[in-house]
Every structure is written in C-alpha cells, then in structure tokens.
Image (cartoon, helix red, strand yellow):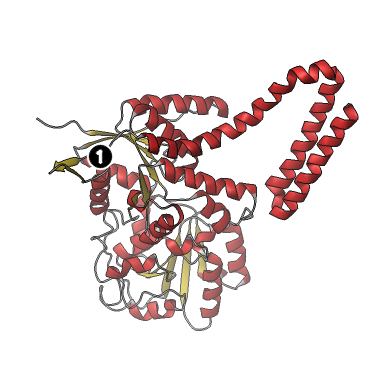
Amino acid sequence: MTAAPIRVAYYRVHDLDYPRNSRIRAHLDRSSAFDVRVVPLSSHPRRSVRILRDLRTLISWARRSDVLVLSELRLAHAAIVWFAGLVTGSAVVVDGFVGLHETAVGDWQSTSPRSLRARSLAYLDRIAFCAADLYLIDTAARATLLATRYGRAEKIVVLPVGAPAWAVPQAPREAQDRLRLLYYGNYIPLHGLDLVVDALHELVAEHDFEVTFIGNGALRAGIESKITGAGLADRSTFVDEIRESQLLGRIAAADVILGVFGSSAKATSVVANKVWQGLASGRIVVTADSEATRELAPWRAPSWCGRTRAIPRASRARSEPYGAKRSPRRPRRHGAPRELGDRALRCLHPAADRAGGDEVTTGLQVRRLDAAGLRRHLLPVLLYFGAPTLSALAPLAVIPAITSSLGARGWASTAIALAVGNAGLVIAEVGWGSSARNGSRSRHAADWASTAALRRAS
C-alpha cells in the first residue's frame, strides 16, 4: 500500500518565480512523496484585515499540512508560523536565506547598529531561528555563524542556491571581438558595483572591453552617473530587467560574468545566483574571494580570482577551449536542482526508524513539542506580543483613580503627558540616527516632561 504524501504548505511566497523557493518547490513537486501547496494571501486594501485573514488562512492550511515552510525574505512572520505549527502539530521549516538585521544594518546601512530598530530586527532574526524545527541557509559559512550565535547547530541545514536547469555550457566566443563583461541583478550594496566601476576605469587605457548592466534597483541611477563620470559611457550599456528565460542568451554573448564585490559580512558569506549560473554556463566568473566562494572549490579554475584585476586575465583566457581556463566541469555535484531537491527531501521527510530501542532519525521527525521545548519557544513569542499588549492595557488600571481624584482636568493633563512622553520616546529610541547615549538622555528628558505636566495638573 502506497504511503500518503507529506503535505507541505509554503507560506508567504513573495514571488513564485524567485529561484530560491521555485527551485525547491519544483523538485518536491516532482516527487510522489510530497504534496506541495502555496498558501494564498489576502489582497484586502486594509492591512489589519489582511493580517487577520492571512492568519486564519494559515491555521486552516496548517490543519491539513504536515510541514509549514516559511519562504525566504519573510522572517518577520516566523512567530505566526510557529504559533500555527504549535496549535496544529505541524513541523515548521524556516528559510533564513535573507536575514533582517544583516540586510538593513550590514548591507544597506540604513539603520544604526545601536538603534532600537536594529535591535528589533536582530530579535526578529532570533525568533525566526528559535521558531523553526529546521532552519535552511545557503552556505556553510553562514551556518557556522548561526551556530555560533544561537547554538542548536543540529537544526541548521545548508541548502545552496545552486544552478538552474537552463544553465548549460555555452560555446566560447570568438577571440577577435572586444572583451564583453556582463553584470545582472538588483542594484543593491551587496553587489559592490562602486568597486566594479572604479576597477573598470583603471583598465580603460590598457584593455578593450565593453560592459552590459542588466536590472533595476535603487542604486542604478547612481551607478549610471558614476559610469558617465568615469568616461565609460561609450563602453557601457544599461538594460532593464529581463525574464529569466532570456538570461542564457545574454550569458552566451558575454566572456566574463561579474559576481559580488560587497564588503559587508553578508556579502562575504553568500554565493550569488549569477555565480552559480555563470559557472554552469561555462563562462569565466570574476567575484570576490571569500569563505563562501571557497566552498565552490570543486569548480574553480585558474581564471577564478577575487579581484577585478582578473578581467585582463579573462581576456587572454577566452580563446582557450572550454575547461582550460573556465570551470573544469559543470557544477552538478552540489549545485544542481536534482541534488538540491534530494537534500531537501532528506531534510523534510518525517521518517524515524527504531533499532534496538534507539531512535535513528533519517530526516525531520514531525513531533509534538515537549514541555521544555514549549517553554523555550513560547517565551520569545510572549515577549514579542505581550509587551505591546501590556503597554496598551496598563492605562486602564488607573482609570478609577484618575476619575475620582482629578476628573476631566486630570484626564486632559494625562493625555498631554502621554503625548509628550511618547513623542520623546520616539525621538530617543527610533532615533533618526541618534546613538544609544543620546537616546538615554532624550528618554530622561521625556520622562521629566511627563512628570512636570502631571504635577501642574494636580
């Protein structure tokens, strides 16, 4: 008799075509052991209504599922997914592909590391890790960092980005043409395009090349301006975002694929999609040397280099046969869709065999949390939801005292004091760039203003 498939509900998928979730879902779909569904999201214009409807839908789907998977880029929803798994008995898998704190503080540097927002994002990252029975990450370097920060290394599973099925080796271009460089992706700090432009400017007098930039993003206008200022406008072409199905043609028309050159901790711990795709397509890849890229050692070639000075060497290498200066073989052993899917199957399959009274776990065992585990997971969630709730309900406890002793004048003064105090806290904690020390001073000032207002009322 055939066993019933494992029911997997994928929650908060922001883009069905995004390589991370689409590749995992596609392989699980091809296996008869899994039934994978994407949880639909509400499109109601009011945010509060959307949240309630999505929560109701999630719990409804969780009752019919064995595994709940929180998609990448959605770590802020981990507590909700954990709660749904708790009440329905479903296992929870969180894809930590993009962390909240590392992106806002490390990459974009849009938030001060000592601000309240930075601490909140770090805490949300921690909640996401604690909420998961299984935590997916893309490189061993990031897995080591997570284990050091949070412990519980046994729940971390490294699932590399890998190369898609369409990325197949392409024939080398003719050596008579000028060297063609290709960048594609979002214009985000992680890619370090400022460094690329500076390096290309230094090479103008020595080498004949042209570069194509594909994609859109917040930093594109700045990069275009810098290209013009560096005198590279006649060698550069900017193209808007294209469909994934068109990428292989663009890669085939290039000699060198430009990877990631950011300096943040995240940039040095990831291997971008285009690095995998470029190697699998038989092209030279120039990217930053890091602990994460060294994990690709089985496919490194002499042309691999962590500095943009590798571009001239790439010009000499392109005339040699495939395999001499390019990746020696297609990255299929650790990066192919089938291998990645098989690894996901092993992680998600709830199989537990018993031999000699000992339990041997061959994958994620779907189980109910014991009392200790419940307390460990429940505390972060209670703090996350309980603190704002307590703050909102606390004023209700003093309603009788204020009404009986001060009356309407007391309520008016209380409202003014709360408004002034909260405004001071917003300035102190959200900070608008202020440091923790300045925030402390502002908080004391706000407390003093609130007290003074109450004294005047009485």
Name the spot of residue 116 as percent of width and height, x first: 64, 47
Can you identify the residue that label 1 sits on? Answer: 29
Residue 268 lies left or right of residue 189; in this view the side is left
Residue 217 in view of the camera: no
Instruction: Determine the residue positioned at 53% across, 57% down.
Output: 188
Quarter of the image with the N terminus in it: top left
Extreme residue in the bottom direction: 206
Extreme residue in the right direction: 456
Name the spot of residue 32 as percent of width and height, x first: 18, 37
Location of residue 92 with respect to 176 vertically, above or below: above
Instruction: Determine the residue positioned at 32% across, 56% down.
Output: 162
Residue 383 in view of the camera: yes
Q: Nearer the viewer, residue 238 or 69?
A: 69
Location of residue 281 with respect to 376 vertically, above or below: below
Q: Amino acid at mark 1?
A: Asp
The number of callouts visible is 1
Quarter of the image with the C terminus in it: top right
Q: Quadrant of residue 178?
A: bottom left
Q: Quadrant of residue 87?
A: top left
Q: Nearer the viewer, residue 234 or 455?
A: 455
Instruction: Determine the residue positioned at 52% across, 55% down.
Output: 102
Name the spot of residue 367 as percent of width and height, x first: 29, 35
Residue 123 lies left or right of residue 348; in this view the side is right
Label 1: which secondary element: helix
Instruction: Determine the residue positioned at 46% across, 28% down.
Output: 54
Name the spot of residue 401 as percent of width and height, x first: 77, 19
Q: Nearer the viewer, residue 43 or 126?
A: 126
Location of residue 119 with respect to 256 vertically, above or below: above
Residue 15 lies left or right of residue 203; in this view the side is left
